[in-house]
Amino acid sequence: MVALACGGLAVFGANVAALLPNSVLGGLHQPRLAGTASVESLRSQVASLRDETVLLRRETMLLTSRFAIQEQSGSDITRRVGALEVTLPRVLEGLPNGVAVDRSNLTASVDMPGTTSFDAEGGSVVVRQTPLPALVSPAAATQPLPAPIDTQTAATPVEQTIYGIALGGPVSRADAAGQWNDLSLKIGPLLIGLEPKLGNTDAAGAQRIIAGPIENLSDARVLCERLERVSIACTPTSFSGTELNLL
C-alpha cells in the first residue's frame, strides 16, 4: 500500500510540474537568500568580464604601439637637432672673415630709405627702412711672381733600377732554355709578362735565370715569397744579363 501511494504521488507530481509555468519553476530554483545571483547570471557576468578584458588588452597594445611610435619620433627629432647643433658652429667657423651680403638677388630688398607709420592700440608705430650697405670690393692683393725658370738648364736624368727575380739554382747556358720551359709549365701564371735572361747573381760568377722586368723591389719580394711557397728558389736582383734563345 505504501508503495502504491508513493507511486501515485510521483505520477501526480510529474503531471502537476508539467502544468505549472516556467516562471514558477524558476522561482522554486532560486536560492534561499534574497538578492543573491543565480549560477546562470554569474556565468553571464563572467563571460562579459572576459569580453571586456579582451577589449582592454587590445586597447593596451594599441596604446603601447602608439607610445613606441611617439618615442621613436621624439628620438629622431632629438638626433636631428643635435646634428644641427654640431654642424652649424662648424659651418659658421668655416666662413671667411668679412663676408658681405650677397646683393645679386634684390628680392625683398629696400632701394631707398623710407619711413612708415600707422596707428596702433595705445599710440602709433613708426617703421624705418634703410637699404643694406653697399658691397665694398676688397683691394686686390698683390703677390710677387716667382723668378722665371731657366729653360737652358737641362734636367739631370735620374737612373732607375729595373728589378727582376733569379729563379732556381745555377745553370749553364745550354740548359737554361730547358729549365725556363720547365718553370713555365710549373708556374706559368706567375711568370706572365716576364722575360728570361741569363745573368750572374753572385761573386763566384754562377749564372741563373733572371725573369723581369719588375718595377720596384717590393713587387719582386712579394713574387719571390709566392714562388718559395711552391719550393722554387727565388732571389730579388737587378734585371740584367743576356737574353735566352728559346727557339
Image (cartoon, grey):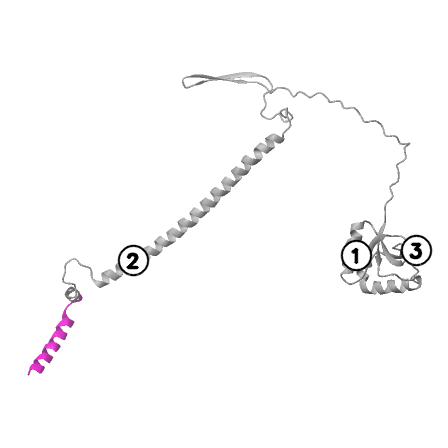
Query: Which of disc 1 and disc 2 is earlier in sequence?
Result: 2
Residue under label 1, please give it. 224
Residue neighbourhood size for the residue with mark 2, other residues' Cα within 10 Å, grouped as few (<14), some (14–19), many (≥20): few
| Up/down of 238 relative to 138, above or below | below
Disc nearer the start of the sequence (3/2):
2
- Magenta residues span 1-22
Q: CA distance from mark 3 to mark 1?
A: 21 Å
Quadrant where the N terminus lies? bottom left
Q: Is residue 41 left or right of residue 5?
A: right
Camera-side mark, 3 or 2: 3
Q: Give neighbour class at mark 1: few <14, some 14-19, many 20+ (Cα, 10 Å).
A: many
The numbered mark at residue 61 is none
Q: Amino acid at mark 1?
A: Cys
Residue at position x 9%, y 79% in the image: 6
> Where in the figure is residue 157, as x and y percent of width and height?
88, 40
Q: Which residue is mark 3?
A: 242
Residue 44 part of the magenta segment:
no
